[in-house]
Amino acid sequence: MAINFDKALGVHQHSLGIRAQRAEVLSSNIANADTPHYKAQDVNFEAAMKAATSRQKGLSMSQTSEKHFDLAALSRQHVQYRVPNQPDTGDGNTVDMQQEQSAFMQNSLEYQMSLGFLDGKFKGMRKALTGQ
């Protein structure tokens, strides 16, 4: 009997990838806090998870020709500009450092939680394979 990792790992594998992408976007915001005209971005987690889980259920488009759009390149489609809570600082920059640091810390905790869930799944699979 073959092991289907999509079924065994559930949504946690997708959650981990989306959280990693969100960490990149948030760290880019923090790094560009002093860059004039930089606009803060964020990942729409719910939309990205919905797209990932629909792919898992086999409802996604498949690429049958090299001339088709590269679906992997479209993965940034869930990155959106954030609506600022306060007016910019006068130079067009919309990064709010406190909001970015808070979002980055929360995302890091949720990333660690997703890693914990995946670790539990792998431990369960290991026990099943070894007959414990």
Image (tube, grey):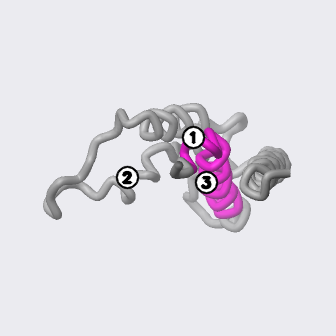
- Is 51 on the left-hand or right-hand side of 59? right
Query: Would residue 31 be seen by someone viewing this image from the given angle?
Result: yes
Span of residues in magenta: 5-29
Q: Pinpoint residue 58: horizontal percent, then vertical percent.
A: 38, 37
- Is 98 on the left-hand or right-hand side of 16? right
Q: CA distance from mark 3 to mark 1?
A: 17 Å
Q: CA distance from mark 2 to mark 3?
A: 14 Å
Q: Residue at x 26, y 47 (%)?
A: 62
Name the residue that disc number 3 marks. 17
Q: Residues within 10 Å of mark 2 (few under 14, many from 20)?
A: few
For residue 114: magenta?
no
Q: Pinpoint residue 26: horizontal percent, then vertical percent.
A: 68, 55
The relative height of residue 4 versus residue 85 in the rendered view (above or below) is below
Q: Residue at x 63, y 66 (%)?
A: 35
Q: Residues within 10 Å of mark 3 (few under 14, many from 20)?
A: some
Most common SS among magenta residues:
helix
- Whichever of callouts 3 and 1 sits on the residue coming sooner in the sequence is 1
Q: Secondary structure at mark 2?
A: helix
Name the residue that disc number 2 marks. 74
Q: CA distance from mark 2 to mark 1?
A: 24 Å
Name the residue that disc number 1 marks. 7
- Is 84 on the left-hand or right-hand side of 124? left
Foreground: 57 or 33?
57
- Whichever of callouts 2 and 3 sits on the residue coming sooner in the sequence is 3
